Amino acid sequence: MSNSSSITQFLLLAFADTRELQLLHFGLFLGIYLAALLGNALIITAIACDHRLHTPMYFFLLNLSVLDLGSISTTVPKAMANSLFDTRAISYWGCAAQLFFFLFFITAEYCLLTVMSYDRYVAICQPLHYGTLLGSRACVHMAAAAWGSGFLNALLHTANTFSLPLCQGNVLDQFFCEIPQILKLSCSHSYLREVGLLVVSACLAFGCFISVVVSYVQIFRAVLRIPSEQGRHKAFSTCLPHLAVVSLFVSTAVFAHLKPPSISSTFLDLLVAVLYSVFSPAVNPLIYSMRNQELKEVIRNLISWIFFKRETFTTSFHK
């Protein structure tokens, strides 16, 4: 038995026991991480450099890509390092920092997805008021509110969680530090304060979910009233990527934390955690660029410019 004052490190869940499987896990996570870095960096660069994409929708998409980069960089590098060096350890303060930043980025992303649903609602249901309701100042304020909400939520939960006395060892049944696993190590009844805070956060998250649902009900009603098929297709093409990202994010996160105990297992918990903490940030750029011709064109031109400049430099160097 130990308490929080004597704990200097936590032991994270290992993906594999054999060295070959550890290296395989390292390679898979490295590939996913590099794909996430490349995809999100391309979107950020394209939106920042092309004035045609300086609109509210792409401004929020840029913020989403930054948050995706932050969230996946909080968990994946440490998991890769542990597999590569055959260890499970993370320091006490490293765990606290990981928990804080992961909550920060995930909460801010959820709030931003709610804001993006409002953006699509105004664009389709109130197009004449789009410039007024979503001016540059309003967009900055909404994005700042999403980031601020993430920071406040992460600060409250991290401070409260790591103020609990821990009496059940230091082994976490997850590959990164998260609140439910740390609460399992707390002393009897000392975790009730954090549970109450989690309930408040869950209520706020449910409010955001209802806001997204109401927005899309209004959007689909408006789109179905558009007389031309081309107009309906264009409206749907701007909404479906966002709806797909929201569905993936919410479904995996809800299942991870609200699934019945009867179907809970270490493997299933690990799989679902990978889906919402690793897979989602990696595929979001693909989802958003798949049906967006304008964004695809800018990214294609950006890649062509990068390779053309490199080829020109290489040719001139050899001459």
Image (cartoon, helix red, strand yellow):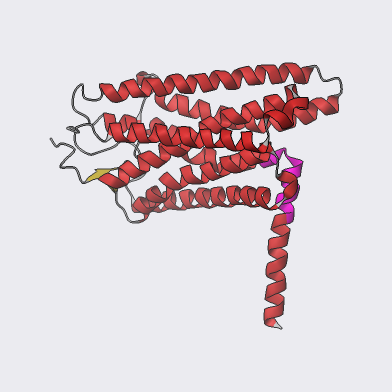
Is residue 315 or residue 59 the one in the foreground? 59
Q: Residue at x 80, y 25 (%)?
A: 232
Residue 164 location (% of width, % of height): 23, 31
The C terminus lies in quadrant: bottom right
Q: From the viewer's perspective, is residue 12 above or below residue 82? A: above
For the residue pair 165 and 182, the one nearer the viewer reads as 165
Does the segment drawn in magenta span residue 24?
A: no
Residue 202 sits in which quadrant? top left
The residue most toward the bottom is 319
- Count of numbered circles on the image: 0
Q: Is residue 234 left or right of residue 142?
A: right
The single residue placed furthest to the right in the displayed view is 228
Residue lying at 45% horizontally and 24% vertically, measured from the top left:
255
Horizontal placement of 241 versus 293: left or right? left
Could you tell me residue 17's position as x and y percent?
32, 46
Name the spot of residue 8 as percent of width and height, x first: 21, 46
Query: Is residue 14 at all visible to an observer of this figure?
Result: no
User: Magenta span covers which residues?
Assistant: 289-301
| Residue 315, above or below 199 | below
Q: Main secondary structure of the magenta part?
A: helix
Q: Is residue 292 magenta?
A: yes
Residue at 68% in and 24% down? 121
Could you say where residue 146 lies in the image, as x and y percent from the top left? 52, 33
Q: Nearer the viewer, residue 87 or 236?
A: 236
Q: Residue at x 38, y 48 (%)?
A: 79
